[in-house]
Image (cartoon, rainbow, N blue to C red):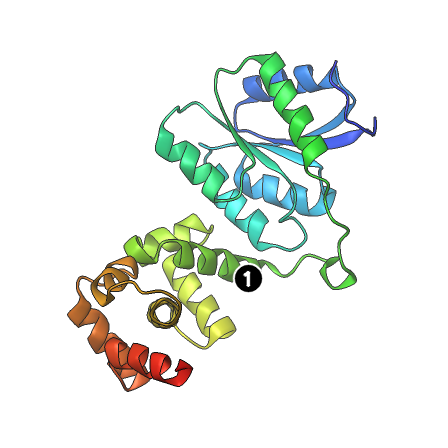
Amino acid sequence: MYLTSDAQVRNILIVDDSAFEQRMLVDLLSEMPYRVSVAFNGEQGYQLALSGQPDLILLDVRMPNMDGYTCCRLLKANPATRDIPIIFLSGTEAVEDRIMGLQLGGVDFVSKPFTPGELAARIHVHLNLMKRPPVEASEAEPIDTDSVIVNAAKRLIYDNLAALPGLAEIAASVGTYREKLNQLFRTHTGMTVFAYIREARIQRGMHLLRDTDMDVQDIALLLGFANAGNFATAFRERMGTTPSSYRASIIKTCD
């Protein structure tokens, strides 16, 4: 039997749409010092995580209504749940799926069918590694759902500036639809999603021009522009100067 280092009873949330796999996981964990709760999809899992504050989440990837990746984005965008360790469970062994799960903030990715002993060991390791920091008073209550969605979309945008999906896909990836996401961005940022993306690209471009020696062409591609000319046009419209002139002014100021 695996015991956590402090022998404390820990709370584990299982999020999986398969009743069979839920039962298998519950049977496995019931032999250990864990309290277990279950959810059948990502939306229900997110709400249970908010209310129950589990010590660890076992999160299936493929689920109806809201998949595991979307659920993870929302959990990591909310201060009340962002430090809960998430272990993804998936029937796929595709490398890109594993990378996606880890990039979103998962601490581990376990392929199905898994060996019960191995999963138990991974749970044990992550419960002992992840000592959740005390929640500050200002973060004791979860932020509102709309703010969580906007925060999750912002992170998705910043992480994928080079190859952003379409607006409908961005919205679906944070559990909403395109019109609603645009409305939320207007309310919370004063901009549409597309305007926010343009601003994010310019701000990131300024950082790269200032703090790196990357070629303007390479920066343009990294930001999702087709070429340096398109980047220069967008940059000049926003900043009143070209990328090269901006970099030259920074260098001159530092001399």
- Residue sitting nearer the eye, 240 or 135: 240
63 relative to 84 in the view: left or right:
left
For the image, the number of numbered tags is: 1
Q: Secondary structure at mark 1?
A: helix
Amino acid type at image mark 1: Asp
Q: Is residue 117 above or below residue 82?
A: above
Q: Is residue 238 above or below residue 159?
A: below
Rendered location of residue 207, percent (x, y):
40, 69
Residue furthest to the front: 255
Is residue 166 something one can see in this rendering?
no
Q: What is the crowding at mark 1: few (fewer than 14 residues within 10 Å), some, or many (at least 20)?
A: some
Is residue 140 something one can see in this rendering?
yes
208 relative to 31 in the view: left or right:
left
Work out which quarter of the rendered image holds the N terminus and state it: top right
Rendered location of residue 184, percent (x, y):
48, 67
Q: Residue 136 is drawn in which quadrant?
A: bottom right
Q: Is residue 174 above or below residue 112?
A: below
Rendered location of residue 150, percent (x, y):
50, 62
Residue at 36% from the left image edge and 54% from the top image edge: 160
Q: Which residue is mark 1?
A: 146
35 relative to 212 in the view: left or right:
right
Residue at 48% from the left image edge and 19% from the top image edge: 112
Q: Residue 23 is drawn in which quadrant?
A: top right
26 relative to 136 in the view: left or right:
left
Residue at 68% from the left image edge and 15% from the top image edge: 27
